[in-house]
Image (cartoon, helix red, strand yellow):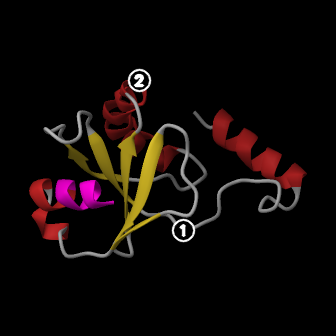
Amino acid sequence: MSLVRRLITRQFPRWADLPLRPVATNGWDNQTFHLGDGMSVRLPTAGEYALAVDKEHRWLPILAPRVPLRIPTPLAKGEPDEEFGFHWSVYEWIDGDPAGIDTIGDLTDFADNLAAFLASQ
């Protein structure tokens, strides 16, 4: 977490004093942290995952108004430096729970919503 704090402080000093904490569940391709109440920081865990950063910054703002579910808005793209060798991102935080068997509830409704999202573009 100290690495994330240093990256934020160096590259986005306006957010340096905001609270920073890890999220409860991370994925394979990114380590994710809460930044303040309304943002998240995602650091790719390997070079192949870092390739998605530019794509996300390009396409998420274009897709957001066109899909039926809320998707994160990129707020800033961090640059590689001597401590972290990949681009990384700050996004709008969207409250919710990771999709899992204990959080989905009605599987048919979940499948319908996911299908509508995938078919929307």
Secondary structure mostly seen in magenta is helix
Q: Is residue 48 magenta?
A: no
What residue is shown with label 2? 48
Tell me the mark number nearer the camera, choosing from 2 and 1.
Answer: 2
Quadrant (top left/top right/bottom left/bottom right) for the N terminus? bottom left
Residue linked to disc 1: 95
* Amino acid carrying mark 1 in the image: Asp
Q: Nearer the viewer, residue 15 or 46?
A: 46
The kind of secondary structure element at disc 2 is helix
Q: Position of residue 116 (x, y in %)?
A: 71, 42
Residue flagged by tag 2: what amino acid is it?
Glu
Q: Is 13 rendered above or below residue 44? A: below
Q: Position of residue 93 (x, y in %)?
A: 43, 63
User: Can you tell which mark lies on residue 106?
Assistant: none
For this view, does 93 lie left or right of residue 69?
A: left
Residue that protrudes farthest toward the top in the picture:
48
Residue at horizontal 56 percent and vertical 63 percent from the top = 24
**Residue 51 appears left or right of 80:** right
- The percent coordinates of residue 12 (x first, y second) are 14, 59
Badge 2: residue crowd in 10 Å (few <14, some 14–19, many ≥20): few
Helix, strand or loop at disc 1? loop
State which region is magenta.
1-7
Which residue is drawn at the image coordinates 79% and 58% (left, top)? 104
Tell me what residue is drawn at x 29 percent, y 43 percent: 88
Residue closest to the eye, 40 or 110? 40
Image quadrant where residue 36 sits: bottom left
